[in-house]
Image (cartoon, helix red, strand yellow):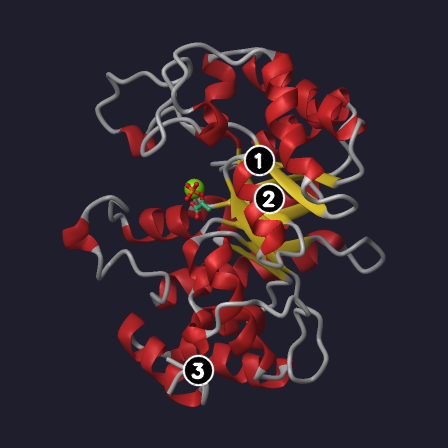
Amino acid sequence: ASATSLAVFSGNNTMADGSHLPLLANVGTAADAVQAAAAGAEGVGLLRTEFCFLNRDTEPTVEEQIDAYGGVFAAFPGRKVVVRTLDAGADKPLPFLTNLEEPNPALGVRGYRTHSASPGVLERQLQAIAAAAAVHSADVWVMAPMVSTAEEAAVFASLCAAAGLRTPGIMVEVPSAALMASTVLREVDFASIGTNDLTQYAMAADRQLGPLALLNDPWQPSVLQLVRLTVEGAAAASGAAGTPKSVGVCGEAAADPALAVVLVGLGVTSLSMSPRALGPVGAVLGSVSMAQARELAAAALAAPSAAAARETVRAALPRLA
Ligand code: PEP
Ligand code: MG
């Protein structure tokens, strides 16, 4: 409780043993980005670009997109900004990309999958991201949502290269991408784990249904196993001599201070969250060493249930006890 009362984030992103752990912000608009920078975020780990265009019936023009993305880049000069390409569908329908007649939208043509159904939209978005990046100093990374296979990752990487965007990545939020991470991540430079959807799909529990909240819990040991597999797969995909493929988390799990410790202990190298979580998460991470985080991650993985994992870890963290 003491940690959650900290309003201002110190912004130094350092664990008790000196390990640096970037804490980034999830934003949807330029106004959010300005607030996130003021709150001490080191960069943006998830720009939900569909939030810029939620009220639109038609595809935004390239010029409108350049303005929207440029406003976010301007708030983080010289800093990392991870742009997610349009994640239309299911809980975030966009009229110009989403078929509202689908019987099962969460399993439908959403996220990266809209690329084959609506050719050209993704190419124009990448063109706009590249144009905005060219006039700002932000370190712009680009990732696709809802990627399930290595083929999809490879096509996305080639589209990014064609647009002149140098750091392509994927969100890992479909269990198949986590299970196949060592193959899928060979195609791209980084992964960002979306625990909201990864939990929904691992547990087969709609994230929007309140009565399923006990299943829809990122502390579920099966979800933690998928995080572990993603980190291990990324290391294997990097190869002995290759540049390590970084694995971040940008789902709500990163905003839970105790779970953030577990994610770091599992080998995740950055966390992205809503700006108001930066203070509480930073305070708890600052109170543990990497060795302690690894021990707590092992304990959570070995727990028989989500509740047991959460209780074991929380009890071991003095700032939360
Ligand atoms: C996620 O699925 O965890 C995620 C970060 O993306 P969104 O919540 O926007 O689907
Ligand atoms: Mg998602």
Does the residue tagged 1 have its C-beta within 8 Å of any atom of ligand 1?
no
Residue on which the image places disc 1: 30
Identify the residue at image location x=52%, y=78%. 284
Local packing at callout 1 (Cα closer than 10 Å; few below 14, some 14-19, many 20+) is many
Tell me the quadrant of the picture where the N terminus can be found.
bottom left
Q: Nearer the viewer, residue 70 or 18?
A: 70
Task: Find residue 206 and report its image quarter.
Answer: top left
Residue at screen point 64% across, 78% down: 15
Counting residues from the N terminus, which is met first, the one under dot 2 or under dot 3? Answer: 2
Instruction: Look at 38% across and 20% down and name the residue there.
Output: 55
Say left or right for 21 vs 288. Answer: right
The answer to whether one can see residue 46 in this image is no
Residue 223 image position (x, y, % from top left): 40, 60
Q: 10 Å neighbourhood of mark 3: few (<14), some, or many (≥20)?
A: some
Q: Which residue is mark 3?
A: 299
How many neighbours does mark 2 have within 10 angstroms: few (below 14), some (14-19), or many (20 or more)? some
Residue 27 appears in the rendering: yes
Against 15, residue 170 (above or below) is above
- Tell me where residue 179 appears, x and y as whole percent: 50, 52
Determine the CA span between mark 3 and mark 1.
40 Å
Are the residues flagged by discs 2 and 1 in contact, CB closer than 8 Å? yes
Q: Mark 2 or mark 3, which is nearer to you?
A: 2
Q: The residue tagged with tag 3: helix, strand or loop?
A: helix
Label 2 sits on residue:
34
Ligand 2 placement by image quarter: top left
Residue with the most extreme right position: 241
Of residues 84 and 37, which is closer to you in this image? 37
Q: Closer to the camera, 275 or 246? A: 275
- Three-letter amino acid code of the residue under disc 1: Ala
